[in-house]
Image (cartoon, rainbow, N blue to C red):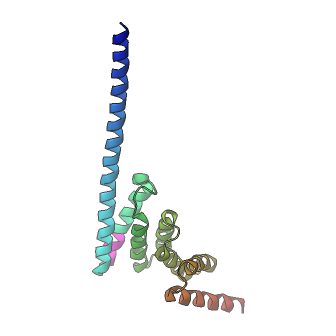
Amino acid sequence: MKNKTVFLFLAIISFILTGVVFWYGSMSVAKRIDMVTMRARFDAAQNATSSGRRQAAAVASRLALVEYQKGSEKPGYYIDIAGDFLTAGNCLWQQGKRRAALAAYEQGLRNDPHSISLLTSAGLCSLQLGEFDLAGNYLTHSQKIYPGDERVNRALSRLKARLQGNKG
């Protein structure tokens, strides 16, 4: 009788562990499918941007951003997501949608707060939007990481000139 109880206990534990492993495996497959789909959308946006099809680039970027924001991906799970938000922001920037571009850059910075490309892009975008304090924060942080970047140095010079112009 004691052997049957032990056997039954082990069978139940084995059944539970099998279910957990199966559930986790299916979740990983679903996440991989989401990653592949999102990567394909960002690649489509990048290709459309490279070939001058701005409208298609903006649509592909928006789809990927919406998918990400709905929670199909968790921050940190998808390794290159910060780079994809840079691509999305650049596509939106080219469409003249500066506010949406800044939101994409900022989302990317949540995943990679030290990305020189995202910091610089967010700074330049903020400068275009007239958000000088925000631009200063992004550009100064960018300059600390990579002081030799001429684009950042020129943008900081423009920002200082605008701030002095606003004071006078």
Q: Is residue 29 left or right of residue 104?
A: left
| Residue 88 percent across, percent down from the top left | 40, 70
Residue that protrudes farthest toward the top in the picture: 1
| Residue 8 percent across, percent down from the top left | 34, 16
Quadrant showing the C terminus = bottom right
Q: Foreground: 120 or 14? A: 14
Q: How many marks?
A: 0
Which quadrant of the figure has residue 66? bottom left
| Residue 50 percent across, percent down from the top left | 30, 80
Taking the magenta stretch, the answer to whether it contains residue 64 is no
Taking the magenta stretch, the answer to whether it contains residue 58 is yes
Q: Please state the extent of the stretch shown in magenta in the rendering.
A: 54-59
Quadrant showing the N terminus = top left
Q: Foreground: 18 or 6? A: 6
User: Overall secondary structure of the magenta stretch?
Assistant: helix
Q: Foreground: 158 or 70? A: 158
Which quadrant of the figure has residue 16? top left
Q: Is residue 63 left or right of residue 154?
A: left
Relative to 73, say whether 126 is above or below. below
Which quadrant of the figure has residue 127? bottom right
| Residue 154 percent across, percent down from the top left | 54, 90
Residue that protrudes farthest toward the front in the picture: 3
Q: What residue is at 34 percent from the left and 32 percent from the top?
A: 19
Relative to 47, say whether 27 is above or below. above
Q: Is residue 86 left or right of residue 18?
A: right
Relative to 150, say whether 62 is above or below. above
Q: What residue is at 55 percent from the left and 84 percent from the top?
A: 147
Q: What residue is at 37 percent from the left and 15 percent from the top?
A: 6
